[in-house]
Amino acid sequence: MDENVVVSRARKLLKDAGIETAPVDVEALALHLGFKVSRVELSEGEAGNTFERRGQKYICVNEKDSVVRQRFTILHEIAHHVLKLPSLHGEKVPGDELERFTGRPQEEIACDVFAAECLVPWALIQPLAEDMNFTLEHLAELSERFQASRSCIASKFAQASEGHLAFVVAEDGVVKYSIGSKALRDARVWISTGIPLPQNSAAAKAHKAGISGLHEADIEGSDWSTSDDARRFACYEQATYHSPTRQTQSILNFEELDPRPVSNGNRERHDDDDLLEELDGRPGWSKYR
Ligand SMILES: [Zn+2]
C-alpha cells in the first residue's frame, strides 16, 4: 500500500467524521466507525486491543498509558480496520512497538502513518508550520495543542514547512526514518535511511553517551547527506535521546550558504535521477508498495 493511499484514507475519515479542530476528537472518529472505546487495566507493555462481541466492536486501551499514547493506540487500531490490514501483532498491541521502526512489518508502520495523519491533520499543521520555527520548543507547544507525540508533530511539520529542514529518527545509532521538507528535496538534499548517524551529529553523541536528554550540534550539510548539493548547506541540529528505546530524534535546520550555481541548474538530468530521489529521499515505509 502506497503511503499516499494511507494518508488520503486518513484525510477522508477526518472529513467524513467532520473533524476540523485540534486536538482531534479521537473517540468521535472511533464512534463514527462503530467502535466503543474503553480505558481498562491491561498488563504492562500492552497498549491496547480490539475485539468484537455480539456484533459490537471494541477498542480497549491501557489506562496507565499517557493520554497521548492512548490516542495514538486508538488510531493505530482504527487504521487496521480502515486500511483492511491484518494485525500482525494479533489482537494485542504491544506498547514498545508503536512509533518504532526496527523489526516491524510495513503494515504496522503504515498503521502508524495513518494514526499520525489523523492526529496531526495536514490542513491544521500546514499554516502553523509556515509561521513557526522548527525547534524543540515549538514542537513541544504543538505537541500539547494537538495532543500528539513529538515525532508525529515533527514529521508532519517537516512535510508541511517551506523551509530547508528535516526530521530524522535513529535507533541504535542507525537512521530508520527521515523526512525532509519539500524545499530540501528540491535543493537535492536527501538523508538516507539505513546509514549510521553522522559521527559528529548531536544524535550520535547522545546515543554514545547513553544519557536521555537534549543535545545540540552545528555541522555541515554534507555530514548528513552524500548528495553534491548538501555541501552548499550548514546544519543546526537539536537532538533528543530516549534511553529505554535507544531512539534519537533529530530536528535539522539547514542554512543555504551558497546558492546553487545557475549553470548547474540546467545540468543534464540523468535517467536515474528520479530513482535516486525515491530511494534516498522518501521515508522507509514508501518501499511498501
Ligand atoms: Zn498494529
Image: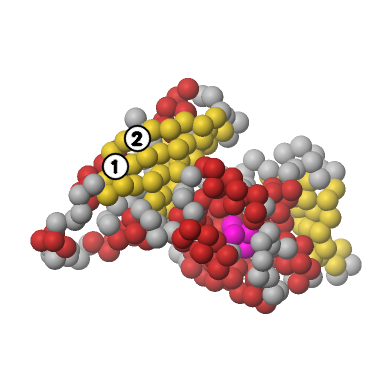
Q: Are marks 2 and 1 in contact (CB under 8 Å)?
A: yes
> Which of the two residues, 155 or 115, is positioned nearer the viewer here?
155
Q: Residue furthest right?
A: 54
Q: Position of residue 184 (x, y in %)?
A: 33, 55
Residue appearing at x 40%, y 39% in the figure: 237
Q: Position of residue 251 (x, y in %)?
A: 45, 43
**Residue 233 placement, left or right of 152:** left
Color encoding of the figure: secondary structure
The disc placed on residue 153 is none
Q: Position of residue 47 (x, y in %)?
A: 73, 46
Label 2 is placed on what type of residue?
Asp
Q: Position of residue 200 (x, y in %)?
A: 34, 30
Question: How many numbered marks does the figure carry?
Answer: 2
Which range of residues does the magenta coloring cover? 116-120
Q: Is residue 117 magenta?
A: yes
Residue 208 placement: quadrant: top left
In the picture of the structure, the residue carrying the numbered disc 1 is 234
Q: Name above or below for residue 44 compared with residue 191.
A: above
Residue appearing at x 85%, y 43% in the figure: 41
Which secondary structure type mostly characterizes the magenta part of the structure? helix
First reached walking from the N terminus: tag 2 or tag 1: 2
Residue appearing at x 14%, y 66% in the figure: 266
In the picture of the structure, the residue carrying the numbered disc 2 is 218
Label 1 is placed on what type of residue?
Ala
Q: Name above or below for residue 107 compared with residue 171.
A: below
Question: How packed is label 2: few (under 14 Cα within 10 Å), some, or many (20 or more)?
Answer: some
- SS type, badge 2: strand
Q: Residue furthest bottom?
A: 16
